[in-house]
Amino acid sequence: MAGEAALLFCSNMRTPVIAANWKMYKNAGETAAFLRQFTGLVAKSAHAEIVVCPPFVDLPAAVDAARGTNIHIGAQDLFWLKEGAYTGEISAPMLTAIGCTWVIIGHSERRQYFGETDDSVAKKIVAALDAGLKPIVCVGELLEHREGGLTESVLAKQCSGGICGLTPEQFAKIVIAYEPVWAIGTGHTATPEIAAAAHTFLRSQVRSRFGASAESCRILYGGSVKPDNIKALMAQPEIDGALVGGASLDAAAFGSIVNYL
Ligand code: PGA
């Protein structure tokens, strides 16, 4: 009983994060227009940290438009070295220099289409933290994994390869996003119970490495989050926020997701 009460207390202490992953959508003008509308919709939303992650080239416009608001701006990826002959890459210090404060790392689309591995994810997390960026580290299984009963082993491998090599100090600064690949952009949201079970498993994995500090780690759910399912997802004590793709492109829709209460 005392243990349960302590856990409940801890879960209530986790401030939710609601983050938008715009993927390869919107130019700088569209970014500014979105934020003109969105800032007003969430100006009083103090219950959650709000993060918007546009494409790299839109970051300066986003930082400008979000200045003085409660909206944080993040990138969707970075490279782990500070500078060098790496054509096309963007480093963590380059992102902080323009006022970017968050970064998504290891999204399944980067793993699937651009060769991201648990090893590169681990290097990118450290680079982000060294520069003072807050990483949202994505993990999640494919449909074939889930159907083959491999969900837990895939999540365990992504945790041990990408996250468990961090120091406790580094771990304390990351946010994890559980994004089942079969739920991304498909309209097939994981049920709140399926998501919560995966979150519980992920927390047990990081608890076995980092101990009690696992209780303060925010674990977000991502995959077809919409205005009409966010409330049920957030009702699960294990779900500490959302990483939202498609529904974050519309200011009114993303505003109502942020204001799920
Ligand atoms: P979705 O994308 O909300 O469009 O499913 C989520 C994500 O990929 O982060």
Image: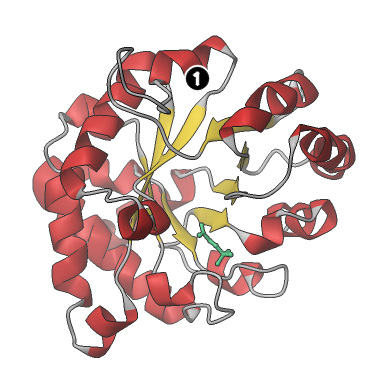
Could you say which quadrant of the image residue 35 lies in? Answer: top right
Residue 32: image x %, image y %?
82, 33
Residue 114: image x %, image y %?
34, 50
- Judge left or right: residue 28 versus residue 117: right
- Judge left or right: residue 113 versus residue 12: left
**Can the viewer see residue 132?**
no
Residue at the spot 52% in from the left edge and 24% down from the top edge:
101
Coloring scheme of the render? secondary structure
If the image is split into quadrants, where does the N terminus sit? bottom left
Q: Is residue 133 above or below residue 77?
A: above
Q: Which residue is mark 1?
A: 95
Picture quarter with ligand 1? bottom right
If the image is split into quadrants, where does the C terminus sit? bottom right
Front one among 139 and 171: 139
Front one among 174 and 109: 109
Residue at the spot 17% in from the left edge and 79% down from the top edge:
150
Front one among 5 and 13: 13
Helix, strand or loop status at disc 1: helix
Residue at the spot 50% in from the left edge and 30% down from the top edge:
102
Q: Residues within 10 Å of mark 1 (few under 14, many from 20)?
A: many
Residue 33: image x %, image y %?
87, 38
Q: Is residue 105 above or below residue 97?
A: below
Residue extending farthest to the bottom is 147
**Can the viewer see residue 203?**
yes
- Judge left or right: residue 126 versus residue 166: right
Count of residue discs: 1
Amino acid of disc 1: Leu
Q: Is residue 210 above or below residue 242?
A: above
Disc 1: residue Cβ within 8 A of ligand 1's nearest atom: no
